[in-house]
């Protein structure tokens, strides 16, 4: 059997492929553990400067593998998987100091949609579809969906998507701001890889600090945000990339970024 999560590194871009195509890349125990380990390694690896998350076959990810659900166990036992696996995966995607792209090739549902929402860019194939899924099996959302979804589409639309659980096609998702771009299926990975390569050649530390600034600003007052911006820009200003970019500007050269 192939590993349910594949990782490759090329030119500073780490591509993480969920690889259970027979089940639309649903997440069983091994897939969750491998995904968690892969994201930990990527977050800590200075050679990685951008991340692409995608799925093998016809699906992106449809969330939890329901075949693993054991009704004989208590709800507490069954849903211990949320703090053990799903929440740490969501936190790693949010906290890593490098940009994340989701290349959505097919259905994204449940926690699989949550993974896509955690990305900075969501590039969707015309064959992609999007479903919150949780209330369809009488559950509430996890993996950060209740945090990301209203911030992307607004509280009213998020409530509609979560409670009524419609399946959106890619153009509908683009219209409401759920995805960044929609492309033909054959253009999905070339488009994602081109954007990832552009980001990997950029000021990685500044990107990471910008991600932190945006997350902080969601939940804090202006005075706190202004103080946080000062803290983060001081950190960015001490990087080789910033100092080199200023020198390049003054000498009318195009800056080259090392990610340091």
Image (cartoon, helix red, strand yellow):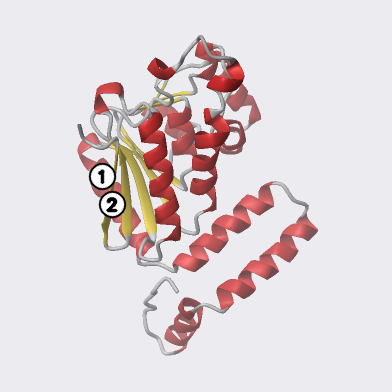
Q: Is residue 220 above or below residue 150?
A: below
On the rendered structure, is 213 left or right of 113?
right
- Asked whether disc 1 touches disc 2, contact meaning CB atoms under 8 Å apart, the reply is yes
Where is residue 125 shown, x and y percent of the image?
30, 34
Residue 126 picture quarter: top left
Please tell me which residue is depicted at 57% across the width and 34% down the height of the picture: 83
Question: Which residue occupies the foreground of this view, 6 or 241?
Answer: 6
Of helix, strand and loop, which one carries label 1? helix
Question: Which residue occupies the foreground of this view, 105 or 75?
Answer: 75
Regarding residue 7, the answer to whether it shows in the image is yes
Where is residue 142 shown, x and y percent of the image?
56, 29
Name the residue beneath numbered marker 2: 193
Please tell me which residue is depicted at 57% across the width and 77% down the height of the picture: 237
Please tell me which residue is depicted at 42% across the width and 71% down the height of the picture: 259
Mark 1 to mark 2 CA distance (whole Å): 6 Å
- Mark number displayed over residue 189: 1
Question: Which residue occupies the foreground of this view, 242 or 86?
Answer: 86
The extreme bottom residue here reads 251
On the rendered structure, is 231 left or right of 64?
right
Regarding residue 161, the answer to whether it shows in the image is no
Of helix, strand and loop, which one carries label 2? helix
Residue 53 picture quarter: top left
Where is residue 98 shown, x and y percent of the image?
45, 58
Image label count? 2
Neighbour class for label 1 at 10 Å: few (<14), some, many (≥20)?
many
Where is residue 181 shown, x and y percent of the image?
38, 41
Q: Is residue 214 above or below residue 46?
A: above
Please tell me which residue is depicted at 42% across the width and 84% down the height of the picture: 248
Neighbour class for label 2 at 10 Å: few (<14), some, many (≥20)?
many
State the quadrant of the C terminus.
bottom left
Q: Is residue 103 above or below residue 106?
A: below
């Amino acid at each position: 059997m192939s590993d349910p999560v594949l990782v490759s590194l090329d030119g500073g871009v780490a591509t993480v492929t969920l690889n259970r195509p027979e089940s639309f890349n649903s997440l069983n125990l091994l897939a969750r553990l491998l995904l968690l380990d892969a994201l930990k390694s990527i977050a800590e690896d200075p050679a990685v400067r951008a991340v692409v998350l995608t799925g093998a076959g016809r699906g992106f990810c449809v969330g939890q593998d329901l075949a693993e659900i054991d009704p004989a166990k208590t709800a507490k036992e069954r849903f211990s998987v949320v703090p053990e696996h799903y929440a740490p995966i969501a936190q790693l995607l949010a906290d890593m100091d490098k940009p994340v792209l989701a290349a959505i090739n097919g259905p994204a549902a449940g926690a699989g949609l949550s993974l896509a929402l955690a990305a900075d860019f969501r590039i969707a194939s015309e064959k992609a579809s999007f479903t919150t899924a949780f209330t369809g099996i009488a559950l509430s959302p996890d993996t950060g969906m209740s945090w990301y979804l209203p911030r992307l589409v607004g509280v009213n639309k998020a409530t509609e998507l979560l409670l009524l659980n419609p399946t959106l096609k890619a153009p509908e998702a683009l219209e409401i701001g759920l995805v960044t771009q929609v492309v033909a299926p054959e253009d999905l990975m070339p488009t994602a890889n081109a954007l990832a390569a552009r980001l990997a050649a950029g000021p990685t530390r500044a990107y990471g600090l910008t991600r932190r600034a945006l997350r902080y600003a969601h939940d804090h007052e202006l005075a706190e945000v202004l103080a946080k911006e000062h803290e983060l820009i001081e950190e960015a200003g001490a990087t080789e990339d910033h100092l080199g970019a200023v020198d390049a500007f003054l000498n009318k050269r195009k800056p080259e970024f090392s990610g340091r």
